[in-house]
């Protein structure tokens, strides 16, 4: 097993198919069913999630983990200001990239992507809003069950949601994309931001806006 496959959680059915959850222990066969240690990983299935005009003068990439409290704070506050002041006005192209420092973060990413790009950011917002509840569950089973309920409440059909959560090939590809992007931009904490190619750590919104304004020449 490569390092990548060793840290990606495989997917198993619990309770006669009532819901899905993932475990790293003793389930490597399911991951290897999706890819082998020496196979090329098809990352084309992992769509880049963005907001705003791709031709905007400033590109902001956010690297965030669904289990990170500071990322939750940014998404439920400053991000709304960023969208209103810069994204919706055509000055910033915003790219959201998931960071999987832990298994629940990867599971949350599978749920967020399950309804497709048009509903992605709405699910992301809900996952962050409910982070204090699902991320603090005492077992992997409870975490996965709570995330599944978020998907169901958002209107994803149970069969479709279970298919998303059982997609080991997609999980491996998502982890591979994360690792490649993190290496490119030197990401080791969340949230981190790349503004027109320069990487910054978490900061206040005023500092954030000042960096954008400098790139805009204002």
Image: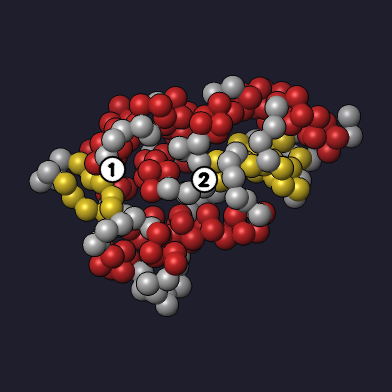
- Where is residue 37? Give x, y as percent: 39, 74
Question: At 24% across and 62% down in the image, what residue appears?
Answer: 26
- Where is residue 188? Give x, y as percent: 60, 50
- Where is residue 32? Give x, y as percent: 31, 69
Label ID, residue 98? 2
Q: Is residue 137 left or right of residue 89?
A: left
Task: State the image quarter where residue 49 is shown.
Answer: top right
Q: Is residue 141 visible?
A: yes
Question: At 65% across and 59% down in the image, what residue appears?
Answer: 184
Quick check: marks 2 and 1 in contact, CB under 8 Å? Answer: no
Q: What SS does tag 2 mark?
A: strand
Q: Can you identify the residue that label 1 sits on? A: 140
Q: CA distance from mark 2 to mark 1?
A: 20 Å
Q: For the residues carrying marks 2 and 1, which lies nearer the camera in this image?
A: 1
Residue at the extreme left: 16
Label ID, residue 160? none
Q: Nearer the viewer, residue 111 or 142?
A: 142
Q: Earlier in the sequence, mark 2 or mark 1?
A: 2
State the quadrant of the N terminus.
Answer: bottom left
Residue at the extreme bottom: 38
Please say if 142 is above or below 81: below
Question: At 89% across and 29% down in the image, what residue appears?
Answer: 218
Q: What SS does tag 1 mark?
A: helix
Question: At 48% across and 49% down in the image, what residue appears?
Answer: 101
């Amino acid at each position: 097993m490569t390092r990548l496959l060793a840290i990606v959680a495989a997917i198993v059915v619990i309770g006669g198919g009532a819901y899905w959850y993932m475990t790293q222990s003793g389930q490597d066969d399911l991951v290897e069913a999706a890819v082998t240690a020496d196979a090329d990983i098809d990352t084309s299935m992992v769509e880049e999630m963005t907001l705003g005009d791709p031709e905007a003068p400033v590109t902001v990439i956010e690297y965030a983990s669904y289990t990170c409290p500071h990322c939750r704070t940014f998404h439920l506050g400053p991000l709304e200001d960023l969208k209103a002041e810069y994204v919706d006005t055509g000055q910033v192209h915003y790219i959201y990239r998931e960071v999987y420092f832990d298994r629940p973060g990867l599971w949350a990413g599978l749920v967020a992507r399950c309804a497709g790009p048009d509903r992605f950011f709405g699910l992301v917002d809900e996952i962050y809003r409910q982070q204090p509840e699902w991320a603090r569950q005492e077992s992997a089973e409870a975490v996965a069950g709570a995330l599944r309920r978020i998907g169901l409440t958002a209107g994803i059909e149970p069969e479709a949601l279970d298919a998303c959560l059982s997609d080991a090939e997609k999980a491996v590809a998502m982890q591979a994309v994360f690792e490649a992007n993190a290496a490119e931009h030197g990401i080791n904490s969340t949230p981190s931001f790349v503004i027109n190619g320069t990487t910054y750590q978490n900061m206040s919104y005023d500092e954030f806006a000042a960096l954008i304004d400098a790139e805009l020449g204002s």
